[in-house]
Image (spheres, grey):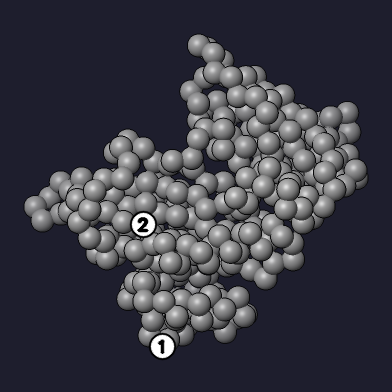
């Protein structure tokens, strides 16, 4: 069996988490249109047994990383460091872009980092369903001229277009090795973590501007009973005014977040869910080492 680890890197909001979900055929990473949605490195486990002659059995562990950006807080530093730290821990790297290299400094910065390592690199040009052929050609040629990518593939992660081609390309760089995880396992993250991420996703979807990025979710209770799972979670925000926005008039906003999250969590767990949500203020937690550690963003 060919096994190995593949890092998925790129700027914020290029579709990394959507791409990971498309690989697995299930949602394990939250996705929104807002940048910096992903805060932790999320591992997705893809296991496939070859059915045709000459087709390899594979287990590929894809690591979805936070978007690499210029950080403005200690949380931002953690996120960027987590993504860059992945470079030295994987057997191949998938670099996802959705625009020309000349469009801004973000992708150039990542290219310069990738140029310094010998790990095999695959460039994925994502969102081709929204892209004119001429734009795709320009992006392709700009990156091809750099000469550091073993393969360049256009995809639409949202539609699943050419995602199997990227999986096959990544598998080519893997070597024979042990199976790291059971073949029915798609992530090593516990359900508590995924539940907290689902709640945070709904906050991102319900709120605008700066509020969602100053929010953290902590699961205080997670009790599984035969026919129901009882969950208590605290939503932390940085300002009293943000607390009011999260709760909304007569608690409507918080109720909407809770209802939307509960429906998805019930589908995930396969049981009824009773959930209590509370909102608390923890000022400037994104720049507090203690708070970042408590919320699982630092060791």
Left or right of 146? Residue 68 is: right
Locate residue 217: give its quadrant: top right
Where residue 201 appears, as percent x and y from the top left, is: 64, 43
Locate residue 95: give its quadrant: bottom left
Left or right of 167? Residue 177 is: left
Q: Residue 237 carries which label?
A: none
Where residue 250 appears, as percent x and y from the top left, is: 88, 28
Question: Which residue is rendered at x = 34% and y = 47% of the image?
Answer: 46
Circle 1 crowding by C-alpha within 10 Å: few under 14, some 14–19, many from 20: few
Question: Which residue is rendered at x = 85% and y = 36% of the image?
Answer: 248
Where residue 210 appears, as percent x and y from the top left, is: 79, 55
**Residue 70 in sight here:** yes
Residue at the extreme bottom of the image, as rendered:
145
Element type at marker 1? Answer: helix
Question: Are discs 1 and 2 less than 8 Å apart at CB?
Answer: no
3 w.r.t. 47: above or below: below
Left or right of 271? Residue 140 is: left
Q: Nearer the viewer, residue 267 or 48?
A: 48
102 w.r.t. 120: above or below: below
Q: How many marks?
A: 2
Mark 1 lies on residue: 145
155 w.r.t. 120: above or below: above
C-alpha gap between disc 1 and disc 2: 27 Å
Q: Between disc 1 and disc 2, whose residue precedes? A: 2
Question: Which residue is rendered at x = 74% and y = 28% of the image?
Answer: 277
Mark 2 lies on residue: 5
Question: Which residue is rendered at x = 45% and y = 67% of the image?
Answer: 87
Residue at the extreme left of the image, as rendered:
53
Element type at marker 2? Answer: strand
């Amino acid at each position: 069996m060919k096994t190995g680890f593949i890092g998925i890197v790129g700027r914020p909001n290029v579709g990394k988490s959507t791409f990971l979900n498309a690989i697995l055929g299930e949602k394990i990473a939250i996705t929104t249109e807002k940048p910096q949605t992903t805060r932790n490195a999320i591992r997705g486990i893809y296991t496939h047994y070859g059915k045709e002659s000459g087709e390899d059995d594979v287990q590929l562990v894809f690591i979805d990383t936070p978007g690499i950006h210029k950080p403005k807080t200690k949380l931002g530093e953690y996120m960027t460091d987590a993504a860059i730290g992945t470079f030295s821990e994987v057997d191949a790297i998938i670099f996802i872009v959705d625009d020309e290299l000349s469009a801004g400094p973000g992708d150039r910065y990542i290219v310069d980092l990738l140029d310094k390592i010998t790990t095999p690199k695959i460039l994925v040009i994502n969102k081709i369903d929204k892209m004119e052929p001429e734009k795709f050609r320009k992006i392709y040629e700009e990156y091809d001229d750099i000469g550091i990518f073993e393969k360049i593939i256009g995809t639409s992660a949202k539609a699943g277009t050419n995602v199997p081609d990227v999986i096959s390309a990544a598998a080519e760089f893997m070597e024979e090795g042990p199976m790291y995880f059971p073949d029915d396992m798609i992530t090593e993250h516990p359900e508590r973590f995924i539940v907290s991420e689902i709640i945070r996703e709904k906050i991102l979807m319900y709120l605008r501007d700066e509020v969602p990025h100053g929010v953290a979710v902590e699961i205080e209770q997670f009790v599984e009973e035969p026919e129901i799972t009882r969950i208590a979670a605290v939503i932390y925000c940085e300002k009293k005014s943000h607390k009011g926005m999260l709760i909304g008039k007569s608690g409507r906003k918080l109720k909407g977040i809770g209802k939307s999250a509960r429906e998805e969590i019930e589908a995930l767990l396969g049981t009824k869910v009773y959930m209590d949500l509370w909102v608390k203020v923890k000022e400037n937690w994104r720049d507090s080492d203690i708070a970042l550690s408590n919320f699982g963003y630092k060791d």
